[in-house]
Image (cartoon, grey):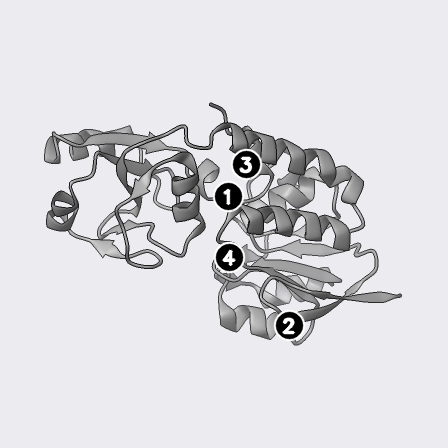
Amino acid sequence: MSFKTYTDQMGREVKIPSQPRRIVSLVPSQTEFLMDIGAPVIGRTKFCIHPSERVSNIPIIGGTKNFHFEKIRGLQPDLIIGNKEENYEEGIDQLAEEFPIWMSDIYTLDDAFDMMTTIAGLCDLENSARQIVEECQEAVNNVRGSKSGRVIYLIWKSPWMAAGKNTFIDHFLDHLGYENLIHEERYPELTDDQIIALSPDKILFSSEPFPFKEKYLELARAKWPTIECELVDGELYSWYGSRLRYWKE
């Protein structure tokens, strides 16, 4: 078997088989892209749910931050694909002792498109990926600047947690035309009083990772009657693979 050396988005050099045939994917958005381009995915996390009709037959190897190492070993992957933020360092380091691991590190749309193009290349599936990447680029270009207002994007409840700087969500909010009022990095906790003090025009309640639903918006509207509250599709705002092509004006 011949190998090629690639540099992943974390700057790590990884020797990968020229045509990997047994891929374990540790990130939902990247799993969806791999499936869409026809890559040979033989293992996934429990959060990798798209495309539902096809991933249901693929073995689950744990969660994004809780790998079942014996299940992964049993699958004998020749490539594992992960992400710096979504996976945990200790688990990745342990897997890297046994398997080639290519890691993404995504903060911007350009990072996302680079990830898709690179993964397609290392899987020798560039032709399959080209149209998907173009559709994603066209979709996000069509919604650039389509929104407005000062917003808080909530991802968790009890405590409230919001998307801050140095995240893909923050970049995408800016791309859409929103002003993200959270200036702390990553995902800071917020109190009710802090949310009121920030005086947002709108609070966006993400459908993931906390499963916000309409009943939570009713409570929030009673709590903050002067603030617009909106439930949004967390997959559209935070999945940086082929799901981007589903954005519409």
Crowd tier of the residue under label 4, counting other residues whose Cα lies within 10 Å: few below 14, some 14–19, many 20 or above: many
Which mark is drawn over residue 75? Answer: none
Say which residue label 3 marks.
244
Say which residue label 1 marks.
239
- Can you tell which of label 1 and label 4 is closer to the viewer? 1
Q: Earlier in the sequence, mark 2 or mark 3?
A: 2
Vertical position of residue 72 compared to residue 183: above or below:
below
Q: Secondary structure at mark 3?
A: helix
Q: Secondary structure at mark 1?
A: loop
Say which residue label 2 marks.
96
Q: CA distance from mark 2 to mark 4?
A: 15 Å
Which mark is drawn over residue 64? Answer: 4
**Residue type, mark 1 in image:** Trp
Q: CA distance from mark 4 to mark 3?
A: 21 Å
Q: Earlier in the sequence, mark 4 or mark 3?
A: 4
Crowd tier of the residue under label 3, counting other residues whose Cα lies within 10 Å: few below 14, some 14–19, many 20 or above: many
**Residue type, mark 4 in image:** Thr
Q: Residue at x 51, y 57 (%)?
A: 64
Left or right relative to 62: residue 191: left
**Residue type, mark 2 in image:** Ala
Cβ atoms at labels 1 and 2 below 8 Å apart: no
Cβ atoms at labels 3 and 1 below 8 Å apart: yes
Q: CA distance from mark 1 to mark 2?
A: 24 Å
Crowd tier of the residue under label 1, counting other residues whose Cα lies within 10 Å: few below 14, some 14–19, many 20 or above: some
